[in-house]
Amino acid sequence: MKLNLTTLLGSAFGLLASLASGADIAGPWSARFQGPRGELNYQFTFQTEGGKLSGKAVSEMGGRTRETELQDGKIEGDTLSFVEVLNFQDNDIRITYTGKIADDGISFTRQAGDFGKSDFKATRGKANELPDPRAALNRQVVLGPDDKPAYEPPPSGFNARKADVPHGKLEIIEYDSKTVGTKRKMQVYTPPGYTKDSKYPVLYLLHGIGGDETEWQRFVDVGSLLDNLIAEKKAVPMIVVMPNGRAQANDRPEGNIYAAGPAFANFERDLLDDVIPAIDSRYATASDREQRALAGLSMGGGQTLNFGLGHLDRFAWIGAFSPAPNTKPAAELVPDAEAAKKQLKLLVLTCGNKDGLINISQGVHAYLKEKKVPHVWHVDGLGHDATHWSHSLYYFAQKVFR
């Protein structure tokens, strides 16, 4: 039988090209391993074209999820490499991966900048589902010796409307959000006797993942709670701003509310660049940092820690009540403990001992304690609920601006 030289050469070159471009790894891969700051759950989705590798990585640590596009991907034979870029304290950290492909998976070495190196194996197949945020509420609670009440619950009727005390004013206002590119709403409380002739401190209150600018008032009756505390001279007269923390064009809590995670992160710019300037221009505010507080419940508690501790030049009083998995790792929240000690007037962290998300707050408390950052750590007998949040606000409102 005669062999066609052209056919043989074509086959040989095809084989060499195939070997050069690497094995077929297109599709999903998953891995769970210990990183420099805790256990990581990763989902990779690879696409290949010749010697080029692209795709995305979805990572979860401590209930917080990130998604990034892979960069600088290459594959040759049974080796591959790519870069994942993560933002840490407004700095881009390049995490490099080098992998060796085998029958039982891909053995990776992961170098996370100067933070450390991890070796792990990724396995082929449909990646495991990342934790359902709702399921986390039912996570088993493990309490430590520090997990106890720091203050007493409020008296009966603390947030009931009373006829014999002066009442402040609640109103819904609109503002122009350059961040979102539309008009947005927020609810504002002004105290009894409010006058343009005085300057008032401002507390910004952030809602949870299923709420909007009305949630705090519906859950807690913020107006009556503040009216009563001010009448009893237990709180200073203050303005309370309840914005919508879902910074997107349709900011209503509709459909899959958990899909709005990026909009809650985007609210950082809306708060700093649009909400605060709108309030300062419309109301008689004392606009220095020591007259500005930030607090929130659940998702808003995570936002409070992320935005408040990240901008201590803007906020001196921080209150996080049952913070949710959007909370950044504690080392990212407070990278400079000495600076935080000097700038914080008050940091309050609360959670219920029936709340499956307590591990998030416990981790933040443990880090703050290790770094000797003064804070109030309060654990009561409640769950992830409005009663806990109302008690937390009752305490926090009495401590700020004093």
Image (cartoon, rainbow, N blue to C red):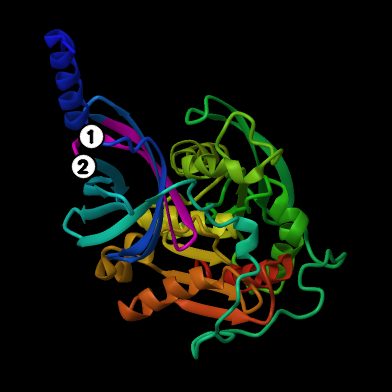
Residue 289 higher or lower than 391, as above or below? above
Q: Can residue 222 be seen in this view?
A: yes
Q: Residues within 10 Å of mark 1 (few under 14, many from 20)?
A: many
Mark 2 — residue?
A: 78
Given the image, on which type of amino acid does mark 1 rest?
Gly
Q: In this view, does 123 lie to the left or right of 196?
A: left
Q: Nearer the viewer, residue 257 or 156?
A: 257
Q: Is residue 87 magenta?
A: no
Give the distance between the C-alpha atoms of the residues marked 1 and 2, in whole angstroms: 6 Å
Give residue 291's position: percent from left, percent from top: 46, 58
Label 1 with label 2: CB-CB less than 8 Å: yes
Given the image, on which type of amino acid does mark 2 rest?
Asp
Mark 1 — residue?
A: 22
Q: Is residue 78 magenta?
A: yes
Q: Which of 298 and 96 is in front in this view?
A: 96
Q: Residue at x 52, y 59 (%)?
A: 325
Q: Can residue 311 be seen in this view?
A: no
Residue 305 higher or lower than 92, as above or below? below
Q: Give the range drawn in magenta.
A: 53-82
Dot label at residue 52: none
Q: Which residue is drawn at 54% across and 44% down?
A: 261
Give residue 82's position: percent from left, percent from top: 23, 40
Q: Which residue is drawn at 16% across and 58% down?
A: 114
Give residue 314's position: percent from left, percent from top: 39, 52
Quarter of the image with the N terminus in it: top left
Q: Nearer the viewer, residue 88 or 175?
A: 88
Mark 2 secondary-structure assignment: loop
